[in-house]
Image (spheres, rainbow, N blue to C red):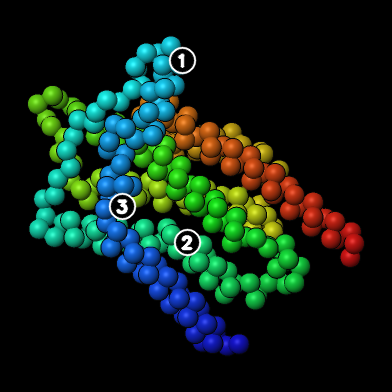
Amino acid sequence: MSFLEHLEVFRWHLVRSVFAVLFFAVIAFIFKGILFDGILLAPKNPDFPTYKMLCYLSQQMGMGDALCMDELPFILMNISMSGQFSTHIMTSIVAGFVVAFPYVFWEMWRFISPALHDDESSVAKGVVFFSSILFLLGVLFGYYVVSPLSVHFLGSYQVSETVANQISLSSFISTVTTVCLANGVVFELPILVYFLTKIGLLTPQFMQTYRKHALVMTLIFSAIITPPDITSQILVALPLMVLYEISIKISARVLRKQEKQLKKS
């Protein structure tokens, strides 16, 4: 196939992906009560599961109500004529992408997979399934761990008691959705390591050598996306480091399989 023929094939994969995202975006737009009140605005409520869990852990560890969150002292407001409608549309598109991610990834994989050799295709079986699972786990981690911690800290932080927090709707929604999507992407690390190892750009020895550097980078990343307290940073950094260790195991396994294939040949 010529370059233009490949481009035409890719265009149709892209078109089908866009239609899938728009389809679920329309559904999300229609069910705005579930999307906003039930999901995105839920971290604003003191009865959010994460806040209940932190309160329970605080009491079990003998810390009293130190981690309990009775109320979030801020109100959401809209300061633009089309603000709520624009937020509704953009949020629906983001929700459509999250739900349609397995299909979108599958379409992109269908475009890439014909270029692989038979042995490479057999080894890459299940990549769509595992990528989708990791992305979903990342989104859920961002929603249930990072988002509520960020919302509580940033929403209650005051430089002075005379300054009240009145947060715009778009700012609140942007914070929650960005955190969830960012964690969804970060959780794709094992898949990225798998393919980088397959093409020879990464080795487990390299990852082990720079493990300390990875730890520092993880702590820095955790400090950026979470409130500046040690508890929040640990809650985010631990899963990321677990992912890093899993990625080392994956890289080592890929190399072992490649060495066995070379011995057989």
Residue 109, picture quadrant: bottom right
Label 3 packing within 10 angstroms: few (<14), some (14-19), many (20+):
few
Label 1 packing within 10 angstroms: few (<14), some (14-19), many (20+):
few
Up/down of 121 relative to 233, above or below: below
The residue most toward the right is 264
Question: Which residue position holds label 2?
Answer: 101
Q: Position of residue 16 (x, y in %)?
A: 45, 76
Question: Which residue position holds label 1?
Answer: 61
Q: Position of residue 106 (x, y in %)?
A: 55, 67
Gap in angstroms between the C-alphas marked 3 and 1 = 35 Å
Is 264 or 146 nearer to us in this picture?
Answer: 146
Query: Tag 1's secondary structure?
Result: loop
Q: Position of residue 220 (x, y in %)?
A: 44, 36
Gap in angstroms between the C-alphas marked 1 and 2 = 39 Å
What numbered label is drawn on residue 136?
Answer: none
Give the quadrant of the C terminus: bottom right
Q: Position of residue 231 (x, y in %)?
A: 43, 26
